[in-house]
Amino acid sequence: MAHDDSRPLTLRDVSEASGVSEMTVSRVLRNRGDVSDSTREKVLEAARQLGYVPNKIAGALASQRVNLVAVIIPSLSNMVFPEVMTGINQVLEDTELQAVVGVTDYTPEKEERVLYEMLSWRPSGVIIAGLEHTEASRAMLQAAGIPVVEIMDVDGTPVDCMVGISHRRAGREMAKAILKAGYKRIGFMGTKMPLDHRARKRFEGFTEALAKGGIEVADQEFYSGGSALVKGREMTQAMLERTPDLDFLYYSNDMIGAGGLLYLLEKGVDIPAEIGLAGFNGVDLLDGLPRQLATMDACRLDVGRTAAQIIATRVADGDEAKYERHVELTPTIAYGDTLKRK
Amino acid sequence: MAHDDSRPLTLRDVSEASGVSEMTVSRVLRNRGDVSDSTREKVLEAARQLGYVPNKIAGALASQRVNLVAVIIPSLSNMVFPEVMTGINQVLEDTELQAVVGVTDYTPEKEERVLYEMLSWRPSGVIIAGLEHTEASRAMLQAAGIPVVEIMDVDGTPVDCMVGISHRRAGREMAKAILKAGYKRIGFMGTKMPLDHRARKRFEGFTEALAKGGIEVADQEFYSGGSALVKGREMTQAMLERTPDLDFLYYSNDMIGAGGLLYLLEKGVDIPAEIGLAGFNGVDLLDGLPRQLATMDACRLDVGRTAAQIIATRVADGDEAKYERHVELTPTIAYGDTLKRK
DNA sequence: CTGAAAGCGCTAACAA
DNA sequence: TTGTTAGCGCTTTCAG
């Protein structure tokens, strides 16, 4: 514990304190190669006494190995990405790898900056949300020479691997279920879309399937920013005042859907007979609501786990690693109490 | 764009491609020192053409400088820490510094591991939640020789700096407001506490202030895991069946409070006349609820901003930097619609 | 304004 | 089982 403190400790300090060569100290501290129990003890004791913390910067430079996986996502305050992170961490926990998160705020420019920043630390792999990136970002990913998994979406062409659901399909499936239940006057509420490609694709799939059933979205509204629950209330109220004959409301995420649900329940609307509702994501908040909102699970935990598994396998087994490069997960509809089941 | 691809690009590659020495290339890429516009252009062009991404590992080792701030928090799926992160990122955005997050899952052992891991990257500073750490963790923080800010709590002694609110005081204030409003039969619901020191301190302050008013908590229940909203419903129901004469329920966080609120509204309970309610945190979800839950803001954004500011100042100005080392923020009670105002 | 030499703290590869 | 020798790719320092 006694130490100058003006200069961080180095391997050499441990070496001198224990009377063992730097190289052997290094081996002990990394559990690499054979070291006799007696020297191992000496080294460990000295390291602990001094409070030595290895310098990974130097280690990484020397070994050309960095046990970091860059995870690049649009947002943390979203309820969806924390769960993806949980999945990723669950599988990385059993490996040497460590996730490092970067947040893009849904902007391609920031994504590019964050990606550049992270790649400059030479991570062992990249997990990145979405398939839409700037040309420069794609070039960086390509050139990095490390495994790259694009997650959350499979409607497009990945740089390397992809794991997710088809949002276009998710939108179609929901539309089909709604039509089948007999709803005809359908309103849509969601985020402003240029920012959120997956929401856009769901909407496209949704309108496409409605069109096949000879129906158009009767009203629609988009928001950005603010408390999603509040926005859901406000948009629902506004839309029903504007278009009172709607019999179904499709929300692009569960939070605004929950807001709409709470609003309609207060109004005493008969759900799902008078008006049906559905959201998207399957967030666990829904379980606590007075009624179960219909939704569709985005398989977030699974996406995280699968993506991490790909990276881990590839890092462990090198180029001859065997794994699926394109994984499409299939979400299922949860009808809950707000979508008639026919 | 043409490049072997088997080996990552180095400064030397850019140097050769541009016909400028490595040293000057380095200067251009870092905007350091004077370089003529013509060579700067040449270098930038070559770097872009090649798609060169600098190796920060090597840079950090050579310069003994790492522009990373380690942020160590218990959880991401909590609604409270993402907001702290937002505050931190807001101020770091204007600096060279970059936050890197580690998650401890509320366990001291994992905290110790994560801290060790992060310190081994030699960050420029540490922001860590809470004042309670293992002895080894405290020793590491002390020995690191970098600014350390412990956040979210000021009831205790920090290693270096602290920024937060007094949870003991927060509990006391809420108890006083409840007593003042005339409630007498008070129930408490919260997380299992050994894990969560801040919740524990709030509870201690709460019971202490009640005791001064000659009142004891009439019933209490603790949970762990699961959907907080659902737990709030379940615990509320169970508690009221067990102790039907309660006239106030104090929840250790807003999510379980919201669950309780939704449950009681469904039951048709008259709030706040028949039963009053209060939570803690001031999460923005509450705005969307049918009634505004009484709560107390934990100043999360401000905590993040202030902590980051301290680190940034210290990194910029070195040891002669001037700033408050202990910052106590004062939360205010939001009465909402569930706590009588007297 | 530009370049050459030295070395950051560690580990790969080899020697003993 | 242990030690020695060379770097890893960059930046610091000093010389031109």
Image (spheres, coloured by chain):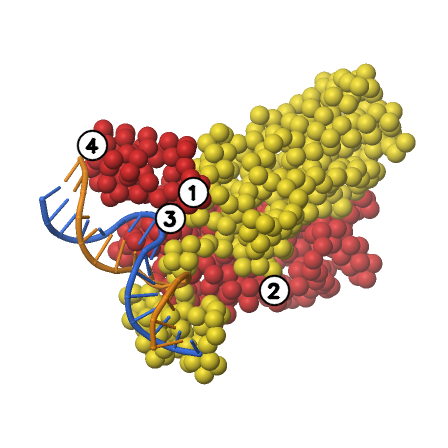
Chain colours: A red, B yellow, C blue, D orange
Numbered tag placed on residue A36 in the rendering: 4
Residue found 82% across the figure and 37% down from its top: B335
Q: Are marks 3 and 2 on the same chain?
A: yes
How many neighbours does mark 4 have within 10 angstroms: few (below 14), some (14-19), or many (20 or more)? few
Q: Is residue A248 visible?
A: no
SS at circle 2 = helix
Q: Find disc 3 in the rendering and name its residue.
A: A56
Mark 4 belongs to which subunit?
A
Residue found 40% across the figure and 60% down from its top: B59
Q: Nearer the viewer, residue A314 or B117?
A: B117
The x, y position of residue A293, in whole percent, is: 66, 45
* Disc 2 versus disc 1: nearer the observer: 1
Check the image and report above or below for A207 versus A309: below
Q: Find disc 1 in the rendering and name its residue.
A: B117
* Disc 3 versus disc 2: nearer the observer: 3
Residue contact at pointers 2 and 1, CB within 8 angstroms: no
Residue contact at pointers 4 and 3, CB within 8 angstroms: no
Residue type at mark 2?
Leu
Mark 3 belongs to which subunit?
A
The x, y position of residue A137, in whole percent, is: 47, 67
